[in-house]
Amino acid sequence: MMTANAPPRPPHSDAEITLYRLQACPYCERVVRKLQELDLAYHSRFVEPMHSERNAVKRITNSRSVPAIVDDRTGAAMAESANIVEYLERTYGEEGEHP
Amino acid sequence: MNFEVTALPEADHVEEGETAPNFVRPLVNDEYWEDVSLVDLLEDGPVLLVFHPMDGAFVTTYVWNELRDREVENYGVQVVGVSISSPYEHKTTIEERGIEHFDGLFSDPGNGVAERYGVDHSLDGMAGIEAARPAVFVIDEDQTVTEAWVASTWPDFPDYDAVEAALGRL
């Protein structure tokens, strides 16, 4: 899922990418590995383990699932680790738009 | 009833007129936590920095109840706490104390922020645990401490009127 109306980067972040994550969530760690592999700066927001209380995530992707990212550089906001990894590759990989 | 309140050793703490030491720790609100520095907060205005014992201690409960009831946010200050408790405990405290409108609680299990401000103390009967003693610092936009209150007994509660007076001078 991807929305065009991504909120601006959090005021306390120095990084363009904000990652909404849950501690020790394997799908979140998958995204972290990709961000590190691509040497991208990111700002972590750790959310509530209880799915029903993750409205901070819902506001940006319309879904409460994590991981989710907001990319200030492109205005993209999305959930689902496979989507995110694919997006990061497409945007920041060697063959990407912003390698 | 006659009893003696335990005195705490003298604290060599940050004083009024000194620069408030910067730090970065996870700042917890009712929805998430993220690394935030004091300097980040000061970019948005002055800060009321409240050191308190671990979440669940009665001193913590009373301090937040009082600051909430006095509506200190009306002075245009960002209200943040610091304790050694984890982000999960902070989330519970924020909900139980009804302080969602404050700016959050920093989680500092290593107690390094309290050490930097000179307000750390070892807890008797809890091996290996150090915590912050109750302390309140009013920090203006220039990162200068304009009011410092540090507990000298255990327990001890902030001089709320003095804190409010300092907030009024910001």
Image (cartoon, coloured by chain):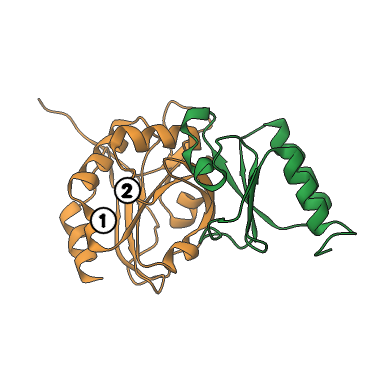
Chain colours: A green, B orange
Q: Residue at x 65, y 42 (%)?
A: A1
Point out residue A79 in the picture as x, y percentages from the top left corner.
65, 41
Q: Nearer the viewer, residue B157 or B107?
A: B107
Q: Residue at x 40, y 57 (%)?
A: B12
Residue at the extreme right of the image, as rendered: A95
Quadrant in which the C terminus of chain B is drawn: bottom left
Left or right relative to B63: residue A65: right
Q: Is residue A70 visible?
A: no
Name the front one of labels 1 and 2: 2
Q: Which comes sooner in the sequence, label 1 or label 2?
A: 1
Q: Nearer the viewer, residue B44 or B85?
A: B44
Residue at the extreme bottom of the image, as rendered: B142
Q: Is residue B119 above or below residue B169?
A: above
Q: Are marks 1 and 2 in contact (CB under 8 Å)?
A: yes
The residue pinned by badge 1 equals B73
The residue pinned by badge 2 equals B101
Quadrant in which the N terminus of chain B is drawn: top left
Q: Is residue B164 above or below residue A27?
A: below
Q: Chain of mark 2?
A: B
Near mark 2 (Cα within 10 A), the count class, few <14, some 14-19 or many ≥20, is: few
Residues behind callouts 1 and 2 on a single chain: yes
Q: CA distance from mark 1 to mark 2?
A: 8 Å
Q: Residue at x 36, y 38 (%)?
A: B94
Amino acid of disc 2: His
Q: Chain of mark 1?
A: B
Point out residue B46 in the picture as x, y percentages from the top left corner.
35, 66
Left or right relative to A46: residue B46: left
Identify the image quadrant of residue A64.
top right
Point out residue B167 in the picture as x, y percentages from the top left corner.
23, 64
